[in-house]
Image (cartoon, grey):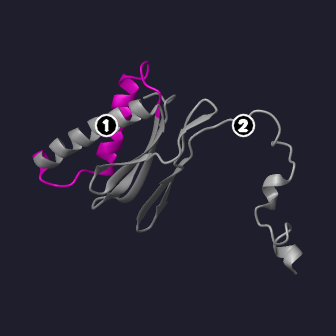
């Protein structure tokens, strides 16, 4: 029965020593970010490693950034670029919230992310998922890709 549930017996990490087709050669690094929309809101997640080529520069970096009370972004690409864009969006959303005397909409945050990344696309390397909850639309998520066009 154990062999059916766990083909590696008592060593659950045994699969790491098992040769496989993609265990030879170069391992490409990359960021994993995700967001899931559901009836009550959204869930965001990301890996925690920052790499420089094939070198892991930091094993505990935070790729989720709060831009408003109920709006977050998942950042992928250049850490400096994406953090600068998130800081700008957060600043503009704070001002906007004061002007309208209400929390910002996710659509507004996504529009700002899209505008800033598009207008600076020749200088930035950034892909962002903007996700959050607002009273008007509930949970929403928007993907802003670095190669997207307006």
Which residues make up the magenta segment?
99-126
Element under label 2? loop
Q: Is residue 84 magenta?
A: no
Which residue occupies 81% across, 60% down?
14
Q: Is residue 46 above or below residue 149?
A: below
Tally of numbered discs: 2
In which quarter of the view is residue 110 placed? top left
The image quadrant where one finds the N terminus is bottom right
Q: Which mark is residue 27?
A: 2
Query: Which tag, 1 or 2, sits closer to the chain's start?
Result: 2
Q: Which residue is mark 1?
A: 112
C-alpha separation, residue under disc 1 versus residue under disc 2? 35 Å
Which x, y percent locates residue 136?
Answer: 28, 59
| Most distant residue in the top direction | 122
Which x, y percent locates residue 112?
Answer: 31, 37
Which residue occupies 36% across, 51% down?
72
* Mark 1 Cα shell of 10 Å, populated few (<14), some (14-19), many (≥20): some
Which x, y percent locates residue 125?
Answer: 47, 27
The image quadrant where one finds the C terminus is top left
Which residue occupies 33% across, 33% down?
84
């Amino acid at each position: 029965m154990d062999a059916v549930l766990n083909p590696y017996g008592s060593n659950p990490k045994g699969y790491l020593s098992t040769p496989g087709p993609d265990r030879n050669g170069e391992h490409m690094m990359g960021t994993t970010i995700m967001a899931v929309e559901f009836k009550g809101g959204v869930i965001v997640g990301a890996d925690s490693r920052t790499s420089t080529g094939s070198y892991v520069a930091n094993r505990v970096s935070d790729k989720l950034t709060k831009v408003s009370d109920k709006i977050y972004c998942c950042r992928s690409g250049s850490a400096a670029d994406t953090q600068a864009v998130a800081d700008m969006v957060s600043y503009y959303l704070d001002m906007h919230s004061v002007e309208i005397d209400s929390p910002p909409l996710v659509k507004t945050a996504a529009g700002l992310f899209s505008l800033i990344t598009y207008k600076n696309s020749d200088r930035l390397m950034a892909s962002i998922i903007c996700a959050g909850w607002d009273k008007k639309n509930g949970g929403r998520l928007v993907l802003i890709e670095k190669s997207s066009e307006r």
